Image (tube, rainbow, N blue to C red):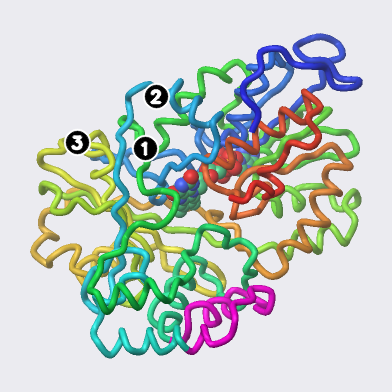
Amino acid sequence: MEQIRTTAPRRDGAANGQGAQSPRIVIIGAGPTGLAAGYRLRELGHTNFVMLEAREKVGGLASSETSPNGFVYDIGGHVLFSHYEYFDKLFDKLLGDEYQLLLRESWVWMCDRFLPYPFQNNIKYLPREVVLECLMGLIEAQREPLDLARFRNFEELIYGVFGKGIAKYFMMPYNFKVWAHPPAMMNKEWIGERVSVVDIARVLGNVVLDRDDAGWGPNSTFKYPRHGGTGGLFARMQPYVQDNLRLESPVAGVDIEAKEVLLRDGSRERYDMLLSTMPLDLLVQSMSSGEVPPVVREQAARLRHSGSHIVGVGLEQPAPSKKCWMYFPEGSSPFYRVTYLSNYSPEVVPDASRNYSLLAEISHSEFKPDDRDTVIERTVQGMVNTQLLKDADRADIVDTFLIERDYTYPTPSLERDPALAVLHPWLESRDIYSRGRFGAWRYEVGNMDHSVAQGVEWVNRVIQGDVQNELTYLAKRGC
Ligand SMILES: Cc1cc2nc3c(=O)[nH]c(=O)nc-3n(C[C@H](O)[C@H](O)[C@H](O)COP(=O)(O)OP(=O)(O)OC[C@H]3O[C@@H](n4cnc5c(N)ncnc54)[C@H](O)[C@@H]3O)c2cc1C
């Protein structure tokens, strides 16, 4: 991404800053993407915009909630890892030294034990017959030269790369738990650096030599705000966009002919350009039907997503572990991941010498319904089943908290890329730009740093005329 510029070249027909020629921009959503776009607009001196946020606070999925008992919970475990210098500078500016630098420690719970992540490099910890099954599967899978092009979907890739054993014990059940969609319905293009593929010599070496192997992935150290959870970072962007921000202002629809955003309270906001970070399918649904070609509606309806129940559990005990987060592929718990959130910052619990907190994530979709009324009890029972808690610890649970969101993971389904190829160009032909985790609907560029980058790069494009530079949204940065 571009470095911060202080003077901005003018775009044809559109002026920077205020004035009669300045294009009116409406931003839907004050999550990381919208906030970053607003921040960048002001950085470039463009103040003719309004940011409409449905909720009472900024941050979107990267905000945090405080329970009545004073425990702070994120909307699922958020690990900050930046691919961008701009993001790093912004982080430093907003937080100074008020952050924790943490060493990643992630684990997988399987066969009644924890093994270090990534699973495939640490199968030596499993029962011998499972180790054998995993190794035999890997050897069989790797008899054929690896040709990713021959796999038609994520399930075929799992079996083709990892073999039957690893597929059976980890990859298939874990991915269904996370995505709440069968891997056969998902494409393989989203994977990039997110799934550690298998180096068979390394796997065999680790087993035979009894070697630990936890060093994989981009996030071996990560930063976490000292105050306010993950949301503490984005809350600090609010003052920079305050003059343009309308909280508790849900958007009900978009009139593309009049170029107006319709708010639920009946008011309207006119735009020359609209940046939407609300879910793309809902954006299209919100447009009056006569204005939207049937093919656009059809493609929007083909996008798939999952939602989450996020369960926070606070205990009146000192933290029993230094672990960061753990994956749970098995059926003994409803959650796919649990974070020792209080290991990220002592400020997320009322008193770190006496309290710790756990944060569990449970996904749901039409393929994997989850009952919100029983999810807290099932989560606590799952924590007992997986030995995170003992039955006796139930007496020390002083806080439970449920966060519900219907849109948390934009599924990289087989239909996604053909649908996006119709939706984005049509929207842009109407001066509507859909960006961010659920705006772009590209999971592979849907993390916090990517979202900030999408907001900034969009502004660079429409205000500075930097047409070639929306690389993050196009997922062309190799992230
Ligand atoms: C479970 C989970 C775990 C995650 N873990 C990580 C992680 O480890 N690392 C990482 O970097 N990222 C992580 N993320 C991703 C991170 O949360 C996103 O990158 C980021 O929040 C996306 O920002 P956004 O602005 O694009 O979208 P959002 O955060 O979804 O913000 C969109 C905003 O638009 C508002 N809005 C929606 N509809 C309307 C409407 N009709 N009118 C007005 N406002 C509206 C919403 O209220 C929201 O504030 C995780 C996300 C989840 C759900």
- Give coordinates of residue 359: x percent, y percent: 31, 53
**Residue 223 numbered mark, or none:** 1
Which amino acid does the dot numbered 1 rest on? Lys
- Seen from the viewer's position, the closer of residues 330 and 4 is 4
Q: Position of residue 467 (x, y in %)?
A: 81, 34
Q: Which labelled disc corresponds to residue 350?
A: 3
Secondary structure of the residue carrying tag 2 is: helix
Identify the residue at image location x=54%, y=68%.
Answer: 365
> Could you tell me how far apart the alpha carbons at marks 2 and 3 are, in whole angstroms?
21 Å
Q: Is mark 2 within 8 Å of ligand 1?
A: no
In the image, is residue 10 above or below residue 67? above
On the picture, is 4 further left or further right than 323?
A: right
2 vs 3, front mark: 2
118 relative to 286, above or below: below
- In the figure, 127 relative to 361: above or below? below
Predominant SS of the magenta segment: helix
Q: CA distance from mark 1 to mark 2?
A: 11 Å
Q: Which residues are magenta?
A: 140-164
Residue at horizontal 28 percent and vertical 90 percent from the top = 129
